[in-house]
Amino acid sequence: MITRRATGLGLAGSLLTRRAAAEMPAAGKRAWAEQVPVIRMGLLGGENDADRLARVDGYKKLMETTFQVPIKLLVAADYGGVIQAFAAGQIDLSYMSPSAYAQAWIQSNGDVRPLSVTQEQDGSTSYVAVMYTRADSGITSLDDMKGKALAWADPNSASGYLIPRSEFRAQGIDPEPGKYFSRTGFAGGHEQTVVAVLNRQYDAGVTWVSGLGDPLAGYTRGALRMMVDKKMLDMKDIRIIWKSRPVLNGPLTVRKSTPVSFQEDMLQFHLALPAAHPDIYRSIDMGSGMGWVPVKHEDFQPFIDMLQAEAAQRRRR
């Protein structure tokens, strides 16, 4: 039996399951600033630009004050923008989905390093992918979705594409359009997918939630929780009809070719942030987790394997 606390897709035995004690780095310019005079930070898609920028404003200012270097934000239209920027050496730091990290590792020839992932309120480090429909759709299960239209969030999203496709195939369901589902398509991000389902453009969509806490509040963390908090969604208007097994949370990621001292400062800053600045932590961690714990590349190898399997499926079509 899979339990959230014990395991999760991609969760290697090396992953720490409790927060490491860390103090906020002392303010001051670092030697690594000669090589990283500007910290170029990527912001994944899935949320409108104004909300993304407002959500990271305090975080950006705190990092600039602490390390005394400017932060330049890359606001990507989709996950692919951040992946390509890592591959081109154009960004130094970004929060990633596990699938986006795996794709960035492949495209950059390994020039990325995962630093940390969120620890949830129950001590786990995982979330679940979910499929949701309109509450008035009459659809109550995955079986009811046969012959219906399904919206994916982003081709580089784990919860919004890779994980559901992998699990559907394991259940004998072909996720290609015109097979089990009448049609599928990309709605442009997690937020946009919810809107498309509510507007009856699709019968269902897929996204991520912590799976913990009050479902009517959008759970403790996740895409639905952010929309509830912004009063863009009333959870009574949707119904969750399918959940995946636990999935390792996406990592805060740095470019591996940056100075090691820069990487370690980024890790220390983020491990200390939840206790030192809880309001800033909550604004950037998309809900209410306990904090961050360190991870290693090996923890994400299963996502690389799934991407390679997905590519093999495309070649066979």
Image: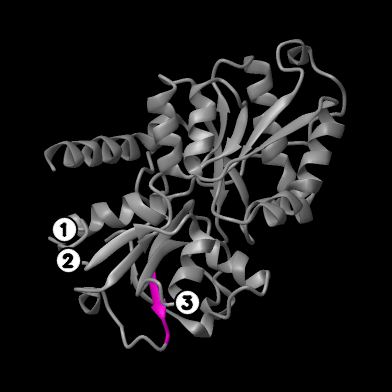
Q: Main secondary structure of the magenta part?
A: strand
Say few, some or many: other residues with alpha carbon within 10 Å of mark 1 (under 14 / 14 to 19 / 20 or more). some
Horizontally, residue 202 falls left or right of residue 46, namely: left
Q: Which mark is residue 198?
A: 3
Q: Nearer the viewer, residue 251 or 296?
A: 251
Quadrant in the picture for residue 74: top right
Residue type, mark 1 in image: Asp
Q: Which mark is residue 180?
A: 2
Visible in this render: residue 150? yes
Quadrant in the picture for residue 185: bottom left
Q: Residue at x 54, y 28 (%)?
A: 85
Q: Are marks 1 and 2 in contact (CB under 8 Å)?
A: yes
Between circles 3 and 1, the one closer to the viewer is 3
Visible in this render: residue 14? no
Residue type, mark 2 in image: Tyr
Q: Residue at x 78, y 56 (%)?
A: 279
The x, y position of residue 12, in whole percent, is: 37, 39
What element does badge 2 sit on?
loop
Q: Residue at x 27, y 41 (%)?
A: 306
Going from N to C along the chain, the mark reached first, 1 or 2, is 1
What element does badge 3 sit on?
helix
Q: Is 110 rendered above or below residue 165?
A: above
Horizontally, residue 89 falls left or right of residue 53, namely: left
The magenta stretch spans which residues? 131-135
The residue indicated by pointer 1 is 174
